[in-house]
């Protein structure tokens, strides 16, 4: 809970009825009135997002929470820009692939946010993973904008304080809505629809109100900290996408120098991620060339962890590889289109992408890996990361390097 002397409007607000005025000890309008906030309800229309066992969809949860957030911000004089107010998407009505429709939808939303000149962006999503063990709300931010990290920390603190213990911390992610927008921006994954208990909570109107209140409180806490830092630490508005600022691949531990042995990166079954960890494995055949080794690595990765492993598949098991090219310090991996609907949720997408990138980069000493889907750039697996540009490995997602 926000703990700032003389600024305890939250207590009065919680005691007030939902439709009563906010009670404050320091005038809240003086802090936020006149601000502009973009609220992005993820997915919509033909794109349901993640779907729970009961049929509950991500798109209906995100819209409901977004509308609740609009009410909270509007009551204190904040101008709200909604990327959608009903069940719709912007991915074109033509006969396009799912991934192409999604990338167009994201580009439209990012353009709308930039055109608004907003002070911050809140993108609301619901997480999912093939296994049901994970739970908890989590914020994601683009590492190229330090203000986004500040915003993510403020919201994560409020989520943990208001909704109960949560070991999750904000994580950097290259999501298009975060990279392509110029204001401080955060994706809030409000919980795992793949977890039966959390799916029941996400279906409850009172719990959705709690989520909206926590996100609102975190945004106000960010504005307060921003005001306190005014004049000493200027807000960084991201005019152009900037590098993620991650250490080079040389900082990663090298692959084991054992004949036909490799490191394959799978998901860690701990409720604090997203996190990858290496499983060392002897490959079935000694590859005669780097492309052959790359193909062998991906086949083993897509087969999943070993029989006695405690790790989880980061990519759903299957034969997803269409084509592969390795040239010097780079590789291009073309994945089958059938993988797109098999990946649901921001965490699942992040882990799937970087399990591939990290596995190839570490074992082949690559600097970048480019992922395509069905031979095309601009496709997306889970609806957050638009593929087609070179990706550098993410050592910060590897558990033993944290």
Image (spheres, helix red, strand yellow):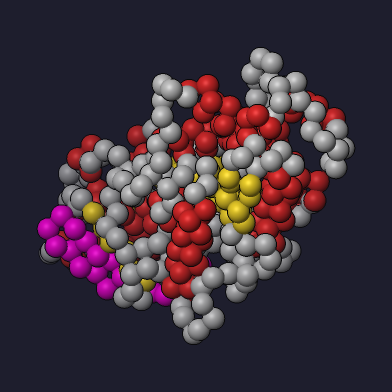
Residue 341 is one of the magenta-drawn residues: yes
Could you tell me if residue 220 is visible in this image?
yes
Q: Which residues are magenta?
A: 321-342
**Image-quadrant location for residue 252:** top left
Residue 98 pos. (x, y %): 49, 74
Residue in front for this viewpoint, 105 or 388: 105
- Residue drawn at the location 58% of the way across and 45% of the way down: 36
Residue 258 pos. (x, y %): 19, 46
Residue 334 is one of the magenta-drawn residues: yes
**Image-quadrant location for residue 31:** top right
- Residue drawn at the location 43% of the way across and 33% of the way down: 235
If the image is split into quadrants, where does the C terminus sit? top left
Residue in front for this viewpoint, 220 or 364: 220
Could you tell me if residue 72 is visible in this image?
no
**Image-quadrant location for residue 34:** top right
If the image is split into quadrants, where does the N terminus sit? top right
Farthest top residue in view: 5
């Amino acid at each position: 809970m926000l703990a700032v002397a003389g600024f305890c409007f939250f207590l009065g607000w919680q005691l007030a009825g939902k439709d009563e005025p906010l009670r404050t000890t320091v005038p809240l309008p003086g802090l936020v009135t006149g601000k502009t906030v973009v609220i992005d309800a993820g997915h919509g229309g033909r794109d349901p997002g993640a779907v729970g066992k009961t049929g509950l969809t991500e798109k209906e949860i995100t819209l409901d929470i977004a509308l609740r957030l609009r009410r909270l911000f509007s009551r204190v004089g904040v101008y709200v820009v909604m990327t959608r107010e009903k069940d719709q998407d912007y991915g074109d009505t033509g006969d396009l692939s799912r991934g192409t429709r999604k990338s167009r939808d994201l580009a439209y939303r990012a353009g709308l946010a930039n055109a608004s000149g907003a002070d911050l962006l809140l993108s609301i999503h619901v997480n999912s993973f093939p296994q049901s063990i994970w739970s908890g709300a989590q914020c994601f931010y683009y590492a190229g904008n330090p203000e986004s990290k500040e915003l993510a920390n403020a919201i994560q603190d409020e989520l943990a304080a208001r909704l109960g213990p949560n070991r999750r911390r904000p994580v950097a992610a290259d999501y298009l809505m975060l990279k392509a927008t110029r204001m401080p921006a955060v994706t809030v994954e409000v919980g795992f629809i793949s977890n039966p208990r959390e799916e029941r909570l996400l279906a409850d109107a009172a719990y959705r109100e709690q989520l909206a209140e926590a996100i609102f409180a975190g945004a106000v806490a960010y504005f307060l900290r921003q005001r306190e830092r005014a004049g000493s630490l200027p807000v960084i508005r991201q005019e152009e996408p900037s590098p993620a600022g991650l250490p080079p691949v040389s900082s990663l531990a090298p692959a084991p120098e054992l004949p036909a042995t490799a490191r394959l990166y799978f998901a860690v079954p701990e409720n604090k991620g997203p996190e990858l960890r290496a499983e060392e494995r002897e490959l079935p055949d000694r590859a005669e060339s780097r492309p052959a080794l790359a193909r062998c690595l991906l086949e083993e990765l897509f087969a999943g962890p070993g029989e006695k492993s405690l790790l989880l598949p980061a990519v759903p098991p299957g034969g997803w590889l269409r084509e592969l090219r390795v040239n010097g310090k780079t590789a291009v991996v073309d994945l089958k289109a059938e993988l797109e609907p098999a990946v649901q949720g921001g965490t699942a997408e992040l882990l799937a992408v970087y399990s591939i990138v990290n596995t190839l980069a570490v074992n082949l000493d690559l600097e970048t890996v480019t992922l395509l889907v069905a031979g095309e750039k601009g496709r997306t697996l889970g609806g957050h990361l638009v593929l087609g540009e070179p990706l550098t490995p993410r050592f910060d997602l590897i558990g033993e390097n944290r």
